[in-house]
Image: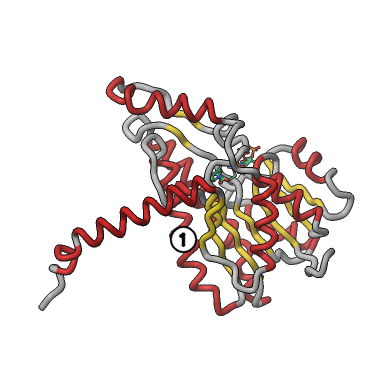
């Protein structure tokens, strides 16, 4: 290990994409990784990655009752978690009108409630030890929005907001919270993992069909490299003062900057109205 202290990482969703790359980079750097997966086969495959440092555990992050005991058992086996990476998540694609409410619940259960349940499982220990990093993988979709992914953006906006408020609550306990917001990266996100709502309202054809087609065509050819993101993750957890929000990818940078500029312009344009509602 090159000058950095050995750490215990707990990373959710290490079977593919970012989670797999994050785990690989942490193991290569000599850290211990507790990696969550959703099948016994995947658990065995993950544990085979390193004879002593890789610990696969089977956990669906929506199994809220199981999370505390699974995390406690893992910590008993390998030691207290220094770094929690809430990576597990998926994208729901479909216009709001065509997407059942149940899909919204599932999207929030995985992307928001699952992440918070994981945080609750490690936070008491981190607080007692006065140390720890919590990294939540959000998305540029936690800042900008696109038609056809309102449920996904809603969940990532929620996780951005939760991360930012939590960062302030736990700062004085030596716990650092970072929301990492990637742009488009080459993972299984837009492929096998995406939940696509059935089409039912022809009025949305002109707007939505090209969006769905473009996303399918781009899958596997996105500009973002998860291995590079993983190197950044290791830098973030070693940093003296890690960022609360970190964008990854040139697309995220461009789109989020444009959004923030437009938001500032709109706030300025309506400033007089905004100022008019206080009591005298
Ligand atoms: P991915 O290759 O599809 O990986 C998703 C991982 O999450 C898989 O390991 C999957 O496990 C796991 N997972 C999904 N639902 C789960 C659940 N209920 N419980 C436990 N694990 C679950 O996609 P990815 O891009 O690496 O996604 C990782 C994170 O990055 C997600 O939060 C995603 O929203 C975010 N993100 C991705 C991009 C992008 O362009 N790729 C951009 C911004 C943000 P299984 O193998 O069992 O399905």
Q: Quadrant of the N terminus?
A: bottom right
Identify the residue at image location x=83%, y=45%. 49
- Judging depth in this view, the residue of 261 and 233 nearest the camera is 261
Identify the residue at image location x=75%, y=52%. 25
Identify the residue at image location x=64%, y=51%. 229
Task: Pinpoint residue 131: horizontal percent, then vertical percent.
Answer: 66, 74
Task: Pinpoint residue 197: horizontal percent, then vertical percent.
Answer: 43, 28
- Residue 3, compared with residue 206, is above or below; it is below
Is residue 7 rendered to the left or right of residue 187? right
- Judging depth in this view, the residue of 223 and 98 nearest the camera is 223
Task: Pinpoint residue 30: horizontal percent, then vertical percent.
Answer: 83, 59
In this orientation, does residue 155 appear? Answer: no
In this orientation, does residue 29 appear? Answer: yes
Q: Quadrant of ligand 1?
A: top right
- Some atom of ligand 1 lies within 8 Å of the CB belonging to the residue at label 1: no
Mark count: 1
Q: Quadrant of the C terminus?
A: bottom left
Q: Secondary structure at mark 1?
A: helix
Task: Give the residue pinned by disc 1.
Answer: 162
Identify the residue at image location x=75%, y=62%. 8
Is residue 73 rendered to the left or right of residue 225? right
The quarter holding residue 180 reads bottom right
Single out the residue that lies furthest toward the left. Answer: 280
């Amino acid at each position: 290990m090159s000058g950095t202290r050995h750490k215990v990482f707990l990373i959710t969703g290490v079977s593919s994409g970012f989670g797999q790359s994050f785990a690989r980079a942490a193991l290569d750097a000599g850290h211990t990784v507790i990696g969550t997966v959703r099948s016994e086969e995947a658990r065995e495959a993950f544990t085979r990655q390193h004879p002593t440092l890789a610990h696969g555990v089977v956990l669906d992050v929506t199994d809220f009752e199981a999370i505390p005991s699974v995390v406690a058992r893992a910590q008993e086996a390998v030691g207290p978690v220094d770094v929690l990476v809430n990576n597990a998540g998926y994208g729901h694609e479909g216009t709001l009108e065509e997407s059942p409410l149940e899909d919204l619940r599932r999207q929030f259960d995985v992307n928001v409630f699952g992440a918070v349940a994981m945080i609750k499982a490690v936070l008491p220990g981190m607080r007692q030890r006065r140390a720890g990093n919590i990294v939540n993988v959000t998305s540029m979709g936690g800042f900008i929005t696109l038609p056809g992914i309102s449920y996904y953006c809603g969940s990532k906006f929620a996780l951005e907001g939760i991360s930012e408020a939590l960062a302030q609550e736990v700062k004085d306990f030596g716990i650092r919270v970072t929301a990492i917001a990637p742009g488009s990266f080459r993972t299984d996100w837009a492929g096998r993992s995406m939940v696509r709502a059935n089409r039912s309202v022809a009025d949305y054809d002109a707007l939505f069909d090209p969006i769905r087609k473009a996303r399918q065509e781009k899958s596997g050819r996105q500009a973002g490299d998860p291995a590079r993101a993983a190197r950044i993750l290791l830098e973030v957890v070693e940093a003296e003062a890690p960022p609360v929000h970190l964008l990854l990818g040139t697309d995220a940078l461009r789109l989020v900057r444009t959004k923030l500029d437009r938001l500032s312009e709109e706030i300025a344009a309506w400033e007089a109205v905004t100022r008019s509602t206080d009591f005298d």
